[in-house]
Structure formats: C-alpha cells, structure tokens
Amino acid sequence: TTTITTTVATTLSTTSTRATTQTSQATTGNGTAAKSAPSTTTATTTRTTTTRTTLTTTTTTLSTTTTTRAPTTTRTTPAATSAATTRASAGLTSTTTRTSATTTRPAAAVTTVTPLATTTTARPVTSTVTRLATTTQSASTAKAGAVITSTTTTTRATTTTRVTTTTKAPTPRLINFGGPVLRNIHAIPIFWNSQVQFRANLSQFYLDVAGSAYMNPLAQYNVLPGSSATGRTVAFPTTQLILDAAIRASIADLIRTGGVPAPHANIYYALHFPPGMGIVSPDGSSSCVNFCGYHSSFTFNTTRIAYGVIPDMGGPCARGCGRGSLFDNTVAVASHELIEAATDPLVGHATRFGPPLAWYDPIYGEVGDICSFQHRYASYNGRTYMVHKLWDNSKNTCV
C-alpha cells in the first residue's frame, strides 16, 4: 500500500481596474477650463486556498504457477528440494515440490496424457492515479463609468483508474479415480536390521496411531481406523546404496519365507532403514536429496503389494526432512506415508488418471502431499507424536 499526499495550491486572483474621469477645477493659462488626464485606481485581492489531497493506491499482485502432474509413486520431499523429477518405468512418483507443468510419463505408460482441466479465477486489482489539470478563465465586465476585469485560475484533480487481472491457484481437491483403498489398514513395520534407530518407539507409534482418531478424517475417502502389528527386525545387510527393485525383492523374499505375514487386501509393509544407507526410488531419485520417504506398490504372485520406504532421518536427511527431533521427523514421514498408503495404495501400478489410482489430486498429489511439511503434535494412547497433517476435502484445509 502506497500513500501519496499531494498539496495543491489554488490561487484566485481578482484584479479590478476602475477608470474614472475627474474634471479639474483649475484653468489653463488662457482662462479656459481644462480636464485633467484620467487617473487609474487598481485594487488587487489575492486569496489562496490550500487543498490537501491524499491518494492511496493499493496494488495487489498474486503470482501463481499452476502445475498439472501425473499420478506417481508418492514420496515425502525434503523441504529444501525444488527440482522436478522424471517418472520411472517401474511406477510413478510424486514430489512434494512442483516446479514444472509437464510430466514425463514412464515407458510403460501411455505416451500422451491429457491433464484434467484446472480452473483459474480472475481477481481484479485496481490502481488509481490522480493528475492535476489547470484551466484559466478570464472575464471582462463593463459597467457605467467603470471597466472591471477579473481573472480566475482553477486547478482540478482528474482521476484515472486502471484494472489489472491476476490469477488464483485452484483449491486442492482429492478426486476418487476408482482404485481400491486400504479401508482398514493393517501396518507391518519392518526394520531392515538391528541398526535401525528407535525400533521400539516406532513399533509403539504404529500400534498407537494406525487405529486412532488420527485416521478419522479419512472416512470421507472410505478409509477407517485400522491396526498394526508389532514391528519386526530382519537381518538384511547395511549397504551404501539400495535400489527400489532390491527393496521389492526383499519384501517378496520375506513373504515367501514367512518372515512377515502374507499380504491381504489391507496390509501395508512399512520399511525403516539404518543410518548411512542411501535409497534410490522407482523414478531414480535419491533419499535425503530428492525425497524423505515414499510409498509404492508392486505385484507378487498375482497379489498387489503396498509398501512404504522411510530412510533414516539423520545425516543428509536432517538438513531438509523436518524441524523436530530425529524421532519426531521419522514419525512425521512415517505418518505421511501411512495415510497415503491407506488412501492410494496402488499408485505404483497407475499409468493414467484412472484405476488403480484412488484418491489423488492431479496438481497437488495425495492426501499428505497437499499438506507437505505441515505437522502437529497429538497424543494417542497417552503418548505424544509429531504427525503429518492431511488434506480434508470437506473442510478445504489441512487437519
């Protein structure tokens, strides 16, 4: 808001000239009466009026970049990361930060995608400019025996209004594309090996939260509070780097050997990894550089498996994956993937805006992505956790 104060001085000058003829009583040398020369009397009256004009100009500029993205394997992205990523053939991945209106589709997907229509709302912004215009009027009035000349100078302010148009980003809206959900999610926490931090606390977190009131807002997406098994520690080696394909193979091996419960319609396998272990997601992006966690899906013996990947939040992840303690940040990412796996479990199988994609916003992503890096502290079963907020369609806000 810019306030301009303009002082306009208006001067009204009236000059009256009166010409009168007086007859002299003196005589000339030859004795004849003579008329004296006319005398002129000038009266000037100056009146000054000062007007203060206060002009307030309000200019509102709203700049919005609208991005329409394809359904993807969702992941929680580090706060400092803004680079868009390319979708991999193994599945689709969504980033929390959007920077591009174009999405490269996976090789297995259709090569041409028509994004869902988005709406932009025009909001006029008015700016006012005042200019000063000066006019001068002169008038002469003749009266008997006198001539009166008056000059009036008037200053007027003229106002010009300009209207500019800005665009407002569309309100997020999760759309049901017809895919299945995990109506009563049953979480299976899996700790990659004994080096994973906070194993006991994380196991308790899933037990406390999966069936709690935290899940209640998901009822509008056909998801109810679920349950969790006690976390189990397996004995896979700590490596410097692991690819998503190897993670899927490890899950399949655990299922095959009975190391974890067999999959069913509501199971979600949540894998937690030890410090120093880098992870490459299905689209080729790197943990703690491009994402803080992700969930996806794959097929094992005709059964579609929903799983999540949560790296250790220390090391590189500590710089961009949360503002709480190491445990708080781990729980925030774990809760993010939990609610998204429940509402869109088969995102890894999706190749278009349609089944098996479930609840998804083509611009902003999934139920947690819309509220990226928004957390709150809440107590469940007498224990307090920093959980990730989720998008509530009915309230048009993050809760």
Image: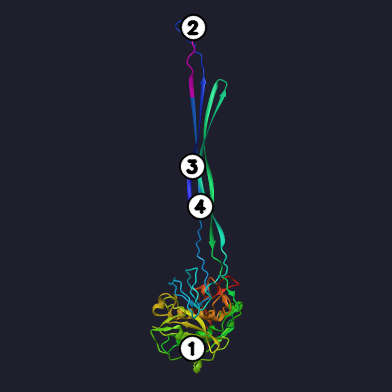
Q: Amino acid at mark 2?
A: Thr
- In three-dimensional space, the C-alpha distance between marks 3 and 4, rounded to whole angstroms, equals 18 Å
Q: Which residue in the structure is indicated by mark 2?
A: 32
Name the quadrant containing residue 325.
bottom left
Q: Which residue in the structure is indicated by mark 1?
A: 251
Q: Position of residue 369 (x, y in %)?
A: 51, 74
Please, what is the dominant secondary structure of the magenta stretch? loop
Name the quadrant containing residue 214.
bottom right
Are dots 2 and 3 in contact, CB under 8 Å?
A: no
- In three-dimensional space, the C-alpha distance between marks 2 and 4, rounded to whole angstroms, equals 77 Å
**Range of the magenta residues?**
33-41
- Tell me the crowding category of disc 3: few under 14, some 14 to 19, or many 20 or more residues within 10 angstroms, Cα based: some
Q: Position of residue 116 (x, y in %)?
A: 57, 70
Q: Amino acid at mark 4?
A: Thr
Give the mark, 1 or 2, whose residue is nearer the N terminus: 2
Q: Amino acid at mark 1?
A: Ile
Give the mark, 1 or 4, whose residue is nearer the N terminus: 4
Whether residue 112 is in magenta: the answer is no
**Observer-nearest of 314 and 44:** 314
